[in-house]
Every structure is written in C-alpha cells, then in structure tokens.
Amino acid sequence: MRLILKPERDKSIRHRHPWVFSGAVARRSGPVSPGETVDIIGHDGIWLARGTASTHSQMIARLWTWNPDEEIDAALIQSRLERAIAGRAALAADPNTTAYRLVFSESDGLPGVIVDRYGDWLAIQLLTQGAVAHTGTIVTALAANLDIRGIYERSDVEIRAREGLPPAEGLLWGEPPPAELAIRENGYEFTLDLAGGQKTGWYLDQRTNRARVASYAAGADVLGVFSYTGGFEVLAAGAGAKSVTAVDSSATALRGVEAHMRRNNLHTDYTPVEGDAFTVLRNLREQGRQYDVVILDPPKFAHSQRQIDRATRGYKDINMQAFHLLRPGGILATFSCSGLISADLFQKVIYGAALDAGRDAQIIETVSQASDHPVLLTFPEAAYLKGLICRVW
C-alpha cells in the first residue's frame, strides 16, 4: 500500500518526524486496512518512509523506518527492542531501582508501544493499529530477550478510541502478576497493582524528580498534593522531613501512602487529607497552615487543544494557593504532564500565580521526565513532563 503526498507536504517526513496526517495525503494506491504496512511517497514519486496505517485517526500513518530496505517485521522489532534495552542498561543493573520504562513508543522507534518493567513483570500498552497488528511479534521478542515471569497488557486508555480500538487488558504471556507487586525506586520499597493501578501501575516518569525534591525536605513540613500512593512523600520522609501531609481524592491511595511509610520504616508525622485538591488547598489557606515544601503533581489537565485555556486556569489556581501556603524561603515543586502545555507556557502560568499571590519566586531547578522516557530529537512531542522547583519569598 502506498500513500502519495500532496505537493509541499513532505518536509516533516523528510525531517524524520514519525506522523503523517491525513490532510497531507493526495491519494492512496488502494484501500487501506488497519495496521497494515504503508509506504509514503512524495508527490514527485520519490519513496520517503515506511510505516503502519491508522485508519481511524487524523494521523493516517505512524512511521517506523526511513530505510527502503527495512521491512516492518520481526527483525526490525528485535533490533529496536535491543536498542531500547541497551539504553536502559544502567537502570537494569541498579539494585536500588527495579521499575522503569523499557520502551517509549516513537522515541524508541516502536510507534504506539509502551513497555514498563516492574521487577519480573512487564506492563505493555499497544496504542495504535500498527502496534496491535504486531502484538504477537512484540510479545515474543520481549519474552525472548528479557528474564521475566509475565507480560500484562494495560491498553485501557482513552487514546485507543481515537484509533478505533477498544480497551484491552489481560495477561499476554507467562504468569499473572501478584495483586501487590513489590518494586524498588531510589532505594525505597513500594507496592503496586499492575493490573488495576493508575497508568501501568506507577508514575515512572517522576523517578528522578522525586529524589531531587526530597533533597530539599530535611527538617521541613512537606505538603504533597495529588499524592497517589506517596512516591514524593515517602522520599521526603526518608530525607528527614519533619512532617508530611498528603492530599488525594482517593482514600485508598492515601492508605497506600501510609503503608509505604511503614514498609520503609519511616516514622515521620503523617497526615492524610482526602478531598478535591482545589478545595483542600483553599481550606488549608483559610486555616492559616504553612509549609516549607509544597509539591504539586496533578494529572493531565489538557487532553485536547480546546482544553488548554481551562487547564492553564487550573494550573494557575493550584499554584497560587501553594504560594500562599509557603513560608518565606520555602520550596515549590510544581509539575505539568500535559503535553499540550509547553514548558514556556507553564512557566508563564506559574509567573502569573506568583504575581497574583504577591510572592517573589526564583526558579532554582528546571526538570523533566526521567531518562527512561527519552525525547527523540525529531519528535519533540515526546517531551510532555515539565517541572519547576522554585524558592519562594
């Protein structure tokens, strides 16, 4: 199958960007089936790239190779997987961390494929028609190249609907994971529910940021907002925090924070606060509460372009409340995982929040996603997580 592009619509493909939008296609050589291999041809008849079809998406093709001699087959998947494994070799050898992202979709040359390693189990997401078409080959390659006990699919995410794919979840290979799967991160122990937890069970992208923020926590009163089961909070307690307050809408998640404190033999004064973060932050301000470190790690606020304005208002609101809650000289660690919110826009939002709160703030660190979530230079869209660590006066 060949997709022939319109004139002057081939620049991004020649620059090795892995997405082809339907509006760039002048014509097709025939009917296109979901996930089938497609060749991308310039309007001048020159072969440009090879990918897989996404018949229900605005992105009609996801590109896998710019080498005309390379087929999308078991050999290509094997070579890309070997490269991904080699890129995480240092993490694999680190006994203090047993959970990390092994394959990060386009950034690792496997569009639509996410693989997270949790000790002896893999959680996999297959998010495009092309990834689904090669499920068997991908699973076989993972099982052959890694010393693991099971591969569990967690393709239960909204993005699949844009590909015309239903949610999918279940065991693909080997043994099912235990209900409580133990992992280590930065030397601390956590448990997760690989089958039922958020994302694929844990927020792996914040691994290095949790350690960075903890470096400011010694002797501090720490407030963690959107805490989930306490990645930031546990490391802060381990670093010598005087007290830790965790805010989450889920009572189950907050019990998880407490369980993780006990599991790591941490005796820091811990206060769980269940409720909507926006409301809780206002209530804490009205109560005159003050903290030395405030951590804001919200879920994605912007899922589409039309949600950007609402998202920026949400980020400004929670950050303004955080500025009010910080003692002079305190630390604000604030994050956005919305890929549609650029780092520049996010910084402008935090600036506006500080201005409205009447506080001076200095950026002392600019942070991003962990190294196992690499950003391919030809695919800047992979840089979705951004964070600022600020000193507030």
Image (cartoon, helix red, strand yellow):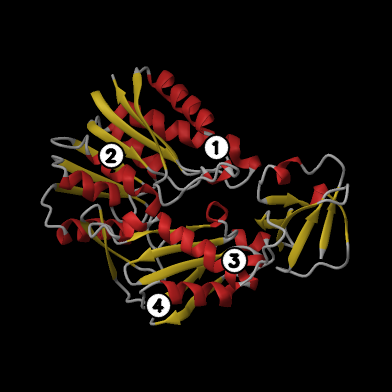
Residue located at (54% from left, 72% from top): 138
In the rendered structure, which amino acid carries the disc numbered 4?
A: Gly
Residue carrying label 1: 341
Q: CA distance from mark 2 to mark 1?
A: 22 Å
Specify the label residue 76 is tagged with: 3
Q: Earlier in the sequence, mark 3 or mark 1?
A: 3
Marks 4,3: beta carbons within 8 A: no
* Residue 295 appearing in the image: yes
Left or right? Give the position of 103 relative to 110: left
Count of labels shown? Answer: 4
Name the mark on residue 212: 2
Q: Earlier in the sequence, mark 4 or mark 3?
A: 3
CA gap, disc 4 to disc 2?
32 Å
Point out the frontmost of discs 2 and 1.
2
Q: Earlier in the sequence, mark 3 or mark 2?
A: 3
Which of 39 and 351 lies nearest the eye of the viewer? 39
Q: Position of residue 104 (x, y in %)?
A: 50, 56
* Spatial separation of the CA atoms under disc 3 and disc 1: 33 Å
| Tag 3 and tag 2, C-beta contact below 8 Å | no
Q: Which residue is mark 4?
A: 150
Residue 223 seen by the camera = no
Q: CA distance from mark 1 to mark 4?
A: 36 Å
